[in-house]
Amino acid sequence: MAAPFANSVSPDPALVALNRFGLGAKPGAEFGKIAADPRGYLEAELKQQDIALISPDDPRNAGLLDSTAAIQASMAAAMERKAARDKKAAAAMQPMAADDPAGPAATQAKPAVPRVEADIYRDEAQARFDKALTTAPGFVERLVGFWSNHFCVSVAKAPVVRACAGAFEREAIRPFVLGRFADMLLAVEHHPAMLFYLDNRQSIGPDSRAGKRRGRGLNENLAREILELHTMGVGSGYAQADVTSFANMLTGWTMAGREGRLREPGSFVFNANAHQPGQAVLLGKTYPDGGMGQAEAALNDIARHPATAQHIATKLARHFIADDPPEAAVARLVTVFTKTDGDLRAIALTLIDMPEAWSTPLTKLRSPLDFVVALRRAAGATAGNEPQRSLRWLSVLGEPLWRPPGPNGFSDRTDAWASAEGLKTRLDIAWQAAKQADDIGDPEEMLASLIGTSVSTETRQAISRAESRQQGLALLLMAPEFQRR
């Protein structure tokens, strides 16, 4: 099904900037502005201070809680309120005297309990969509999406992850997206959402005080996924013994419970009683017993491993250039990653500076998330229920927000999304978006501001023959030039 999106013509640089690196054009003069200096426009975005951050102090994000700990406190308070209501309702259900004046009214149904984690998830989703819809051209948001999928957690794991997935992205991804890879890695692996998602709170050193007392042992999930997915990659030279040794080093990394004995509930905590004592060997290097610092030292070393540079460079080139990226592009990214100690801003600048990024045809199909964001940017304001509408669209397209099928995240290859059913679903959503748009301009004029000179004769003819503006907009949103990146 990838054939309809094939294009061997050298792409328009403005369309490369907007579709390959950005989140798509918005109606207006943006396309012409970018066409004057596509690379410079992208570089300017990378220079903006704190551009990736989503602040709870921003009036637009009034519903956001300011930290994972605050989210956990809100959930705990909701559970206490529910318990109090349940107790009161149970007392009201006790047998009454026949002449009790309260009568049946005392047994009325208890009020519905609000799903606090669902409300938090909705507010986080709205803040994320608002950020994507207002930024221009959206290169940094694309980087956030890449890293959030690389270091993914899933809201399907448990209510606590559902509530914290947005905060995880705000706290562990966004502050470091233009910083050092090692710093992002440490932030991610310290975060309660990741520790909960990959079960490290269940991992106890067999020879630790807690291990001897409880008779419990290691859970290797976090250690394995760090090596296999987050850093070095499959087949990069580590062995099962390295996984086990690393799991021992990570014991004690957990999140504080609701009772708050070790620290503020919902925050990261190192539980020395659960940490496996003694030195450990990882990838041939011996790490002395150093409590929490033992695993931190290992993470810093793994972040600089040549296999990590290769793994990250390949994934970035696949995401931004082609499913099978040019070897020269990958090699250049590896070199920059190594020479700059994983400077992600330098790597982003390298991406937009390499010739392959501008000469490789736009053949990748936009992922569902990129498609929904680009569609909403193109269609403009709509009246209706957001973010539920966009969340529903993502679910039916197969990429529900912060709910990947596994720790390896969503696929970044076109063939994962280019099925006949998937394209039909995109057409349905394009038609819905066109019908719901508040103010549709002339679709033929919109071609210039959304696609520029790259529009094909077939696309132009199809839109010119549309029976209504809604139909014309839907056809534009499904045009190969709009779907490709």
Image (tube, rainbow, N blue to C red):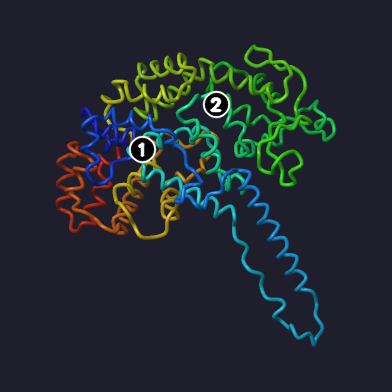
Q: Where the C terminus falls, by quadrant?
A: top left
Q: Secondary structure at mark 2?
A: helix
- Please indicate whether residue 292 sits to the left or right of residue 187 in the image: right
* Residue identifier under label 2: 183
Q: Secondary structure at mark 1?
A: loop
- How much space separates mark 1 and mark 2, taking CA atoms? 23 Å
Q: Which residue is depicted at the point 60% across and 39% down?
A: 193
Spot occupied by residue 322 in the image (x, y as percentages of width and height): 35, 28
Q: Nearer the viewer, residue 176 or 278?
A: 176
Quarter location, residue 188? top right
Q: Which residue is depicted at the point 24% across and 57% down?
A: 470
Q: Is residue 21 above or below residue 106?
A: above
Q: Nearer the viewer, residue 342 or 455?
A: 342
Going from the N terminus, do you reach mark 1 or mark 2 first?
1
Spot occupied by residue 66 in the image (x, y as percentages of width and height): 56, 45
Q: Nearer the viewer, residue 75 or 203?
A: 75
- Please indicate whether residue 482 sits to the left or right of residue 402 in the image: left
Badge 1 crowding class, 10 Å Cα cut-off, few under 14, some 14 to 19, many 20 or more, is many
Q: Where the N terminus falls, by quadrant?
A: top left
Label disc, if present, on residue 138 of the rendered structure:
1
- Please indicate whether residue 103 sits to the left or right of residue 372 in the image: right
The amino acid at mark 1 is Gly
Q: Residue furthest right?
A: 213
Spot occupied by residue 139 in the image (x, y as percentages of width and height): 36, 34
